Image: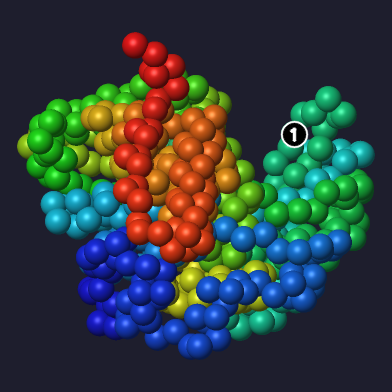
Amino acid sequence: MPEPNAPSSRLPGFYKLSVEERLDALAALVPLSAEERYQLRKEALAVGLADQMVENVVGVFGLPFAVAANFRINDRDYLIPMTVEESSVVAAAGHVAKLVREHGRITASSTEPVMIGQTQIVDLPDPETARRRVLEMRDRILAIANEQDPVLRDLGGGARDVEARLLDTRRGPMLVVHLLVDVRDAMGANAVNTMCEALALYLEGLTGGKVLLRIVSNLADRRLARARIEVAPEAFDERDWKGSVVAEGVVKACAFAEADPWRAATHNKGIMNGIDALVVATGNDWRAIEAGAHAYAARDGRYKPLSRWDLTPEGRLVGEIELPMALGTVGGATKVHPVARLALRILGVASARELAEVAAAVGLVQNLAALRSLAAEGIQRGHMTLHARNVAISAGAAGDSVALVANQMVREGRIRFDRARQLLRHALKRAGEEVQRMETRLHDRSPEPPAPKPEPLKEPGRDKP
Ligand code: MEV
């Protein structure tokens, strides 16, 4: 059912506005306090707060905070907050979300938010008996675990099950006890680690072994998020491309990734471009998400793409993704970081499961955006302008000179640091000459001399006949 209070995610022309105008447009959909506006524009994270978050703080590090438009997932609109440094990620996500919104549908689902805590037991006198005893005492183990977190229990979560696995390692046999914990809306690492630590003495007594590691597993394969896109091939019709050809190209790109881990890594990187941007924006642990995703991609013993694209008999393009998604909407930076809090408000999710579903959908849309461009015009055209702007800035351009230098490099089809420096020097020289002319005029009070014809911008190596 569509959420009645969800703001529309259609933001036509949003990209053409200034930052201030975009904030106004956003505030019309998600009310922003003066403080939130200030934080977005000036002080995303106060250094005093940063100092409380980690050790040895000497400052804060800024990244762009953007909103991707057009997402409609499970018949509900979402504005997707994204924190990412790479050009084109946000624009590509919003563009493909629009195509799918107009020509198809995105659905998503998730499992219960169950995390796994691992306890490693070594130096066992009888590993098999130890394993059996752990399973026999399942209820007692769960009771000890649940005593550690009455709040989680009251919220409907808590330790749910116990598993015991024997491992043959190069340091002898080990017993690994898995504690399965429903962590509700938390990312869950803290709750799980606390339970595992509290169980150590009991497990040593039970098994006669020695407990070593007690830690959450980032292969959170009991906490999965899934998304599915179905879209008509006409969505990809363009002047130079027939949509059905692009759709077939997307399926072939996926088949390439299935057959080749080198390609699968890049395919999955494209998925994580979207997921990580959302995960970072919401103050979640992106290393945990990355670790889980890639371990899951290799769960059959071979590294594979996390998504799969196919064509239906009617020629519609269908993509599916499934991956671990240990995300929280409470605790950690999600509640401490003011912009992460705002990101969750912009998103308007009611639970960590809903956030996980949105993240899976964003990953799949981002994947489709990458495969669509790769199967058609190639990735560089879309990347070009934004990339050129970044190169111009890194070469020292600021203000109006950024667009001047970037546009010229795009026209030339050469986006290079040395060329940006050359163009920038040229632009500065011309600006200096202009200032000098003005000063001379003021000084002489002479009538305005005709301005010299501007020297054309020359491309390197092309100035000789
Ligand atoms: C670049 O950040 C991501 C892509 O390489 C993903 C892909 O190749 O599928 C474009």
- What is the quadrant of the N terminus in the image? bottom left
Front-lying residue, 220 or 96:
96
**Rendered image quadrant of residue 408:** top left
Residue 126 point in image, percent of width and height: 86, 38
- What is the quadrant of the C terminus in the image? top left
**Rendered image quadrant of residue 149:** bottom right
Tell me the residue that label 1 is attached to: 167
Q: Is residue 177 left or right of residue 378?
A: right
At 82% across and 32% down in the image, what residue appears?
Answer: 173
Label 1 Cα crowd, 10 Å radius (few <14 / some 14-19 / many 20+) = few
Q: Is residue 285 left or right of residue 65?
A: right
Secondary structure state at the residue bearing disc 1: strand
User: What amino acid type is highlighted by mark number 1?
Assistant: Leu
At 13% across and 31% down in the image, what residue appears?
Answer: 241
Q: Quadrant of ligand 1?
A: top left
Q: Is residue 278 left or right of residue 358?
A: right
At 23% across and 41% down in the image, what residue appears?
Answer: 318
Front-lying residue, 168 or 351:
351
Residue extending farthest left: 314
Q: Is residue 345 above or below residue 145?
A: below
